[in-house]
Amino acid sequence: TQLLEQSPQFLSIQEGENLTVYCNSSSVFSSLQWYRQEPGEGPVLLVTVVTGGEVKKLKRLTFQFGDARKDSSLHITAAQPGDTGLYLCADRKPSGTYKYIFGTGTRLKVLA
Amino acid sequence: ETGVTQTPRHLVMGMTNKKSLKCEQHLGHNAMYWYKQSAKKPLELMFVYSLEERVENNSVPSRFSPECPNSSHLFLHLHTLQPEDSALYLCASSLITGTSGGGELFFGEGSRLTVL
C-alpha cells in the first residue's frame, strides 16, 4: 500500500517569511497533485505535476517534482495570512481506477 | 449554485439514530466520491460512484450505506454509528474522460459529524 508522508506536520510562521513543505511517497507517483484546504472548506486543487524534475509556479507558490518521481516540495515565498490552511499532496492513480491517495498533510498557520 | 454542495454542514447524532448526508454537484461530472477526514489521519476514500454505479468500496462498515440515484446526487445513509465515526465527511466529484482516469477532484465543504 502506497504511503505519502508529509513534513512538517505543523508549521507556524510570521507573515513575510518563506517556507517549504515536503511530500515523500513510498512508491513512484502516477500523477502528483497538491491541494489546499482552508478552515471550514473542502480541499482545492493547486497544481498537477506529471514529469520528473518538473517545476511549476503559481504566483508565490513553487512546486517541484523529484527526478525519480517519489518526492515533491512546495515552496511559498513571502507567506501571507491567506496562505493559512492544510496542504495535502495526493497521487492520482492511472486510468482504470478511481483512487486518489492522500498524504498526511501539513497544517500551516501564517501570523499577521 | 456552487460546484459541490453538501448538507447538512453539521450533524450531531446518537448511536441509535438514523440520518443521511446529502451531496449535489452542478459541474456535469460523472464520478462522485465520499471521503472521511479524521484528525491526524490522511483522507480516507470510502466510496466511489461512476455513472451511478458503485466502483469502489474501501471496506467501509455496513453502518455506512451510500446511494447514488443519478449523476448529480450522492447520499450517505448513517445508522447505529459509533463515537469513532465522528469526523468530517467530504463529498467530491470529478470528470472521467476516456482512458485518462479522473482529473481534478472538486470537493464540497464537508459535513461535520459528531456521534455521541
Image (cartoon, rainbow, N blue to C red):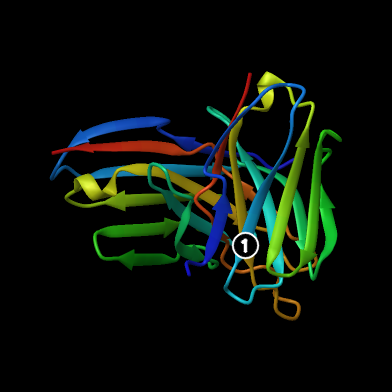
The quadrant in which the C terminus of chain A is found is top left
Residue located 78% across and 60% down the image: B68
Q: Is residue A39 visible?
A: yes
Badge 1 is on which residue? B24
- Residue A96: horizontal and vertical position, in percent? 80, 67
The quadrant in which the N terminus of chain A is found is top right
Quadrant of the image occupied by residue B29: bottom right
- Residue A37: horizontal and vertical position, in percent? 43, 48
Q: Return the residue nearer the eye: A100 or A65.
A: A100
Q: Residues within 10 Å of mark 1 (few under 14, many from 20)?
A: many
Please give left or right for residue B81 compared with residue A33 in the image: right
Q: Residue furthest bottom?
A: B98
Residue located 44% across and 48% down the image: A41
Residue located 68% across and 49% down the image: B34
Residue located 21% across and 34% down the image: A13
Q: Is residue B18 above or below residue A80?
A: above
Q: Return the residue nearer the eye: B45 or B62.
A: B62
Q: Is residue B42 visible?
A: no
Quadrant of the image occupied by residue B33: bottom right
Check disc 1 and give the amino acid type. Glu
Q: Is residue A84 above or below residue B96?
A: above
Q: Return the residue nearer the eye: A67 or B22.
A: B22
Q: Report the number of numbered marks.
A: 1
